Image (spheres, rainbow, N blue to C red):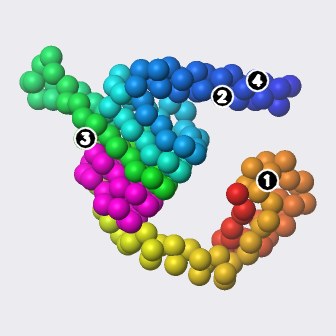
Amino acid sequence: MSKIKSFVKRFFNRINKNSEIETLLNEGLTLGENVRIYSDYPFDSLYPWLITVGNNVTITPEVKILAHDASPSSVGIHNYAKVGCVNIGNNVFIGTKTVILCGVSVGNNVVIGAGSVVNKDIPDNSVVAGNPAKVICSFDEYKKSQLTKLENHKKFEKSWKDWKTATIEEKKEMKKLLASTYGFVSE
């Protein structure tokens, strides 16, 4: 019974999320091609027309992209909120629980680490992380590092999406192989 409830919940959440995205697009949100959204309601619903997302962008779970900031009212500036455009370039990966604040531009070929708070512009070809987010290396350095790690660690050819339906034996084998290291699953 719980599997049925889980399926129904996921089904209706997907419909609601798609409906929300369609509404925001109708209100001016701009999304490029091949934008993968794994987060429920990542976009500021009050000012979606101020948000532009480029091509080949991945938005992971629990990301928030804000085009407004109501905090001025907390310091006595009543009846006003700060608003600003958010521009996200092409080929960008936004890690889980990242918050991108209003008035920020994210360049092309950027990786934003999980849990980051982006309060300033991010230049092209950068990898950033932290609160506040800071450049930690170039995009090319990160790519080279990941390719080296891929060569030296266990690769699982099963797609990450297919591991949800893996057998108990497959899951146990994966856990055993990764007990003291990490590996990679295919997309």
Judging from the image, what secondary structure is the residue with disc 3 in?
loop
Q: Earlier in the sequence, mark 3 or mark 1?
A: 3
Judging from the image, what secondary structure is the residue with disc 4 in?
helix
> Closer to the camera: disc 4 or disc 3?
3
Q: Residue at x 42, y 30 (%)?
A: 29
Residue 156 relative to residue 129: left or right: right
Residue 44 appears in which quarter of the rendering? top left
Please name whichever residue, 166 or 91, is drawn nearer the observer in this view of the structure: 91
Q: Is residue 20 within the magenta segment? A: no
> Closer to the camera: disc 3 or disc 1?
3
The amino acid pointed to by label 1 is: Trp
The amino acid pointed to by label 4 is: Val
Q: Which residue is mark 1?
A: 163
Q: Is residue 148 above or below residue 15?
A: below
Please name whichever residue, 8 or 82, is drawn nearer the observer in this view of the structure: 82
Q: Residues within 10 Å of mark 4 (few under 14, many from 20)?
A: few
Q: Residue at x 45, y 53 (%)?
A: 90
Residue 92 relative to residue 154: left or right: left
Rendering coords of residue 12 (x, y %):
69, 22
- The majority secondary structure of the magenta stretch comes to loop
Distance in Å between CA atoms under marks 4 and 2: 10 Å
Residue 103, numbered label = 3
Rendering coords of residue 64 (x, y %):
42, 38
Q: Which residue is mark 2?
A: 14
Q: Earlier in the sequence, mark 2 or mark 3?
A: 2
The amino acid pointed to by label 3 is: Gly
Q: Residue furthest left?
A: 76
Judging from the image, what secondary structure is the residue with disc 1 in?
helix
Q: Which residue is mark 4?
A: 8
